[in-house]
Amino acid sequence: MSNQIVIEKTKSPKQKPDQNNLGFGLYFTDHMFIMEYTEGKGWHDPKIVPYAPLSLDPSCMVFHYGQAIFEGLKAYKGSNGEILLFRPKKNMERVNISNDRLCIPSIDVDFAVEAVKALVNVDKDWIPEAEGTSLYIRPFIIATDPNLGVRPSHTYKFMIILSPVGAYYKEGLNPVKIYVESNYVRAVKGGIGFAKTPGNYASSLKAQMEAKEKGYTQVLWLDGVEKKYVEEVGTMNVFFKINGEVITPSLEGSILSGITRSSTIELLNSMGVKVTERKIAIQEIYDAHANGTLEEAFGTGTAAVISPIGELNWNGNVVEINNGKIGELSSKIYDAITGIQSGKLEDKFGWTVKI
Ligand code: COI
């Protein structure tokens, strides 16, 4: 494959949105990255071109059988104007984990990181600088064979699009209310729960809508077999602080291995806070609340960053966590992660990558 990325710049740049009113995933920059895969030829023809709709055959396999994966990462503009990515290699390594599960050919991780850098560089004027904003980067791969047979496609498109974003949840850093889902399940061991693939999100919508009708922002998924152990929240991994110790569900094959999750674990370790990855039953969380040892709960994710959890509803039993306020540790982790991501704090972990 030629690694030369051909760049075709737009002749009609778009107007940029108001940085203080971005929402999440509503605006897209002037350019996109696209590269093709053809069986026998591999990945080829990497290009950065003006952002535009795609023309695809209606029989494309992705439309029918969902053979696709995606990622999410962010670029920040540091205080001296430098552009920073947060652990981009981790995302591209995860692309290949998802690809393997979905029978999509693997990508070259280092090249994919270079593609992200090249695209962000072309659209660098789109990186918002207002507090709490960033440029969200969405790489994705779709199966493009025009064929209705159920089998892996022989052709794919790997694309990257960029979206200037604010907070994912309208609550921002205020605690979100979470509904513990006891009816629907997200994933089981052996399934696709650990892969970042659209099907996991499509299957979550029904529960999310029902939770929303009851006044909850997201659902907390329990394991798909016993509906006993906590897994993850719709768009985030989840952490509980009980009696001074931070506990997060261990990755048992059905949970997404979040990059903000692993960064949070490393950060907590470096702060001397005890973190344990293990199975944690929802009952244990309710017991901790009852005996006064449930101190904080928060979610972690690229889009959501750190999102405190202020309330849980499990089968109608409602518990308020930390009086519905952001906890001290959640706030400390938020400041540390966003400080490193935006270059405001020293990155002693070597997580940020300058463009
Ligand atoms: C992310 O945090 O980047 C995600 O992919 C979650 C999302 C589906 C918005």
Image (cartoon, rainbow, N blue to C red):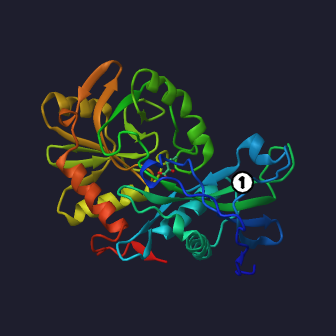
Which element carries disc 1, helix, strand or loop? Answer: strand
Q: As rendered, which of 178 and 148 lies closer to the eye?
A: 178
In x, y percent, where is residue 40?
83, 70
Q: What residue lies at 45% left-to-right and 61% top-to-bottom? A: 128
| 264 with respect to 181 (left or right) | left
Q: What residue lies at 12% left-to-right and 33% top-to-bottom? A: 292
Residue located beneath label 1 in the image: 142
Q: As rendered, which of 89 and 347 lies closer to the eye?
A: 347
Please indicate, yes or no, whether residue 136 appears anywhere in the rendered image.
yes
Please indicate, yes or no, whether residue 93 appears anywhere in the rendered image.
no
Amino acid type of disc 1?
Answer: Ile
| 10 with respect to 163 (left or right) | right
Q: Quadrant of residue 281?
A: top left
Q: As rendered, which of 219 and 283 lies closer to the eye?
A: 219
| 168 with respect to 123 (left or right) | left
In x, y percent, where is residue 290?
16, 27
In x, y percent, where is residue 72?
52, 56
Q: Quadrant of residue 265?
A: bottom left
Q: Is residue 92 above or below residue 101?
A: below
Q: What residue lies at 49% left-to-right and 23% top-to-bottom? A: 210
Q: Quadrant of residue 311?
A: top left
